[in-house]
Image (cartoon, rainbow, N blue to C red):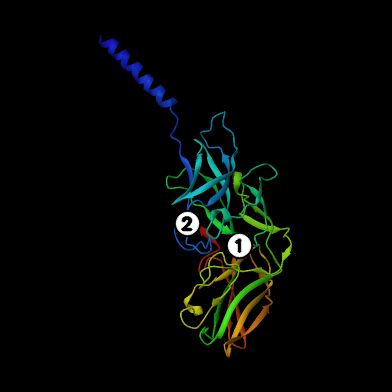
């Protein structure tokens, strides 16, 4: 009887051991950590990516020391959309049970609507087909959307319970305009200055962006992004407006934007009242359209429509914020150019 009990115990133990060997490890989903603070400027008016924005990711699998004979290194997935959910980007993709992953990613942001994002034509992979090593983006004309395009990579990653941190860099350059009028607009007496709009002349909005991650697949080297084949120059593109008095995010220019010396002085409002986002390029000229209000002749307003064209020098480089502060009086326009990293007080990369 005791022998029978012992045999049964051995059989039960053997059965349990077999179950443990046959039961796979729990599936662990791949997720990327998101921005939690205001350094991204992506979208340019917000503190972090809104929910439902997309990160496009490709991954390559490196085999680990416990790989089986049936395992193989190679592309794990290509051009998968990970969607922002509160604190992370996620999609129904899971970590392999062995080895590590290399990731190459890009993101496109709209002003407020995720449907406004740039949708480039993407060709993934280098000459050997590794999709985490290279992607070529044919970026369409962005003269209406003025969206931000970002890119990043992370290599040799394994599952982490909190998610995988991914650093994104700006692939483009932003040109900002901040303005004030030294003579406050007085509607009753029709005196002062009104800024009607700012147009950018001859800028490039489309082109080919090649992003390379030589460190993928066990290689070495730094992530790089290079623009080529810029499209046609576009004349008189109006600057988008955000946060201005009597303006909305959909206004094509600074229409009716009355700037005085009281509540809307330059020091009291953030830079970037109007902006455009472009591929890096030689700096172009822009024209300020404004009206000088010289009072009334009887009941008739005396207005003079004016414009001033400013020729920029140098280049608008990738990852930079090119700010032009504009000060308008009744008889002159003063423009002060400033170039900083896009992320104020920080590097041109952002941690998400």
Q: Quadrant of the N terminus?
A: top left
Q: Is residue 61 above or below residue 285?
A: above
Residue holding disc 2: 35
At horizontal 56% and vertical 32% (from top left) the residue drawn is: 71
Q: Position of residue 118 (x, y in %)?
A: 61, 55
The answer to whether marks 1 and 2 mark residues whose Cβ atoms lie closer than 8 Å is no
Label 1, label 2: how far apart the Cα atoms are: 21 Å
Query: Front-most of 17 and 85?
Result: 85
Number of the label disc, if any, that sits on residue 160 = none
Q: Position of residue 214 (x, y in %)?
A: 63, 50
Where disc 1 sits, the SS reads loop
At horizontal 31% and vertical 17% (from top left) the residue drawn is: 9
Q: Is residue 123 left or right of residue 346?
A: right
Q: Is residue 349 above or below residue 272?
A: above
Where disc 2 sits, the SS reads loop
Q: Is residue 151 visible?
A: no
At horizontal 52% and vertical 36% (from top left) the residue drawn is: 65
Query: Front-most of 93 and 23?
Result: 93
Can you tell which of label 1 and label 2 is closer to the viewer?
1
Number of the label disc, if any, that sits on residue 146 = 1
Q: Position of residue 319 (x, y in %)?
A: 59, 64
Q: Earlier in the sequence, mark 1 or mark 2?
A: 2
Q: For the residue carrying disc 2, how many other residues have a C-alpha within 10 Å: few (<14), some (14-19), or many (20+)?
A: many
The quadrant holding residue 72 is: top right
Return the residue found at the far front: 299
């Amino acid at each position: 009887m005791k022998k029978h009990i012992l045999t049964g115990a051995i059989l039960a133990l053997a059965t349990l051991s077999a179950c443990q060997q046959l039961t796979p490890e729990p599936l662990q989903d791949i997720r990327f950590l998101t921005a939690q603070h205001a350094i991204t400027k992506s979208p340019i008016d917000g503190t972090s990516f809104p929910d439902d924005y997309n990160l496009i990711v490709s991954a390559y699998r490196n085999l680990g020391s416990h790989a089986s004979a049936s395992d193989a290194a190679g592309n794990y997935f290509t051009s998968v959309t990970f969607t922002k959910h509160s604190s992370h980007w996620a999609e129904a993709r899971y970590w392999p049970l062995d080895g590590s992953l290399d990731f190459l990613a890009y993101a496109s942001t709209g002003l407020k609507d995720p449907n406004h994002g740039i949708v480039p034509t993407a060709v993934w992979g280098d000459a050997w087909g590794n999709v985490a090593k290279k992607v070529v983006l044919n970026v369409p004309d962005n003269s209406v959307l003025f969206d931000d395009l970002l890119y990043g990579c992370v290599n040799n990653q394994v599952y982490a319970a909190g998610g995988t941190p991914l650093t994104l860099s700006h692939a483009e350059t932003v040109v900002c305009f901040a303005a004030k009028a030294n003579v406050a607009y007085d509607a009753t007496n029709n005196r002062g200055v009104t800024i009607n709009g700012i147009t950018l002349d001859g800028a490039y909005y489309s082109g080919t962006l090649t992003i390379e991650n030589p460190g993928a697949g066990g290689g070495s080297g730094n992530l790089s992004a290079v623009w080529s084949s810029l499209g046609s120059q576009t004349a008189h593109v109006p600057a988008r407006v955000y946060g201005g008095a009597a303006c909305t995010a959909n206004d094509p220019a600074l229409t009716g934007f009355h700037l005085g010396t009281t509540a809307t002085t330059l020091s009291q409002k953030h830079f970037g009242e109007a902006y455009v986002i472009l591929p890096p390029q030689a700096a172009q000229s822009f024209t300020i359209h404004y009206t000088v209000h010289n009072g009334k002749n009887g009941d008739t307003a005396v207005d003079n429509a004016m414009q001033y064209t400013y020729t920029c020098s140098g280049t608008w480089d990738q990852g930079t914020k090119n700010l032009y502060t504009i000060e308008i009086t009744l008889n002159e326009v003063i423009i002060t150019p400033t170039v900083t990293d896009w992320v104020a007080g920080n590097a041109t990369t952002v941690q998400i």
